[in-house]
Image (cartoon, grey):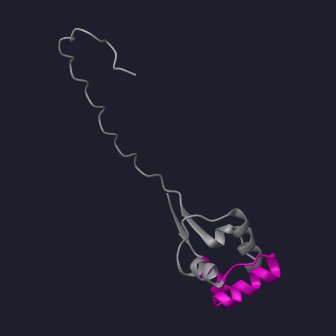
Amino acid sequence: MKATWRLRMAAAQREVWTGAQLRRLLAEKAGLKMSSASVSALLTKQPAQLKLGTLAALCTALDCTPNDLLDIDTTPVAATPTPPAPVARAAGPAKPGRSMPPL
């Protein structure tokens, strides 16, 4: 499964061109105060993770749905073959003495 972050496109479709504009909308409409660096990072690269509260705030600020911000490819991927389990070697003759390792 592959997800594509489309915040910049969703913002542009709503005439929001800069991080400063988005930051102002987030504060005014959703009550979310974010640093300029955080907003810039959301606009310029795909986040590895995203809080649901942040996603909801972005949707509120841009008057959109999560489907406008994320494009998820649900095409099933082929299962990767699992490597064979290692074969246990035959134990050699038992040594006299201990049968268990020391504690």
Residue 28 part of the magenta-drawn span: yes
Left or right for 21, reference 70: right
Q: Residue at x 53, y 69 (%)?
A: 4
> Residue visible at 56% across and 72% down?
5
Residue 15 seen by the camera:
no
Q: In front here: 92 or 24?
A: 92
- Determine which quarter of the picture holds residue 103: top left
Q: Can residue 48 be seen in this view?
A: yes
Residue furthest to the top:
96
Up/down of 67 relative to 33, above or below: above
* Residue 44 as seen in the image, left or right of residue 87: right
Magenta-colored segment: predominant secondary structure: helix
| Bounds of the magenta segment | 7-35
In the image, 87 versus 76, the foreground residue is 87
Locate residue 88, reporting x and y percent: 26, 24
- Residue drawn at (71%, 74%), measured in percent from left and top? 58
Which residue in the rendered view is the most extreme toward the left? 93
Determine the image quadrant of residue 32. Answer: bottom right
53 over 29 or under it: above or below: above
Residue 13 located within the stretch drawn in magenta: yes
Residue 96: image x %, image y %? 22, 8
Residue 67 vertical placement versus 102 (above, below): below
Q: Where residue 81 appears, x then y in whole percent?
A: 34, 42
Question: How many marks can you see?
Answer: 0
Residue at the (75%, 87%) spot, across then down: 24
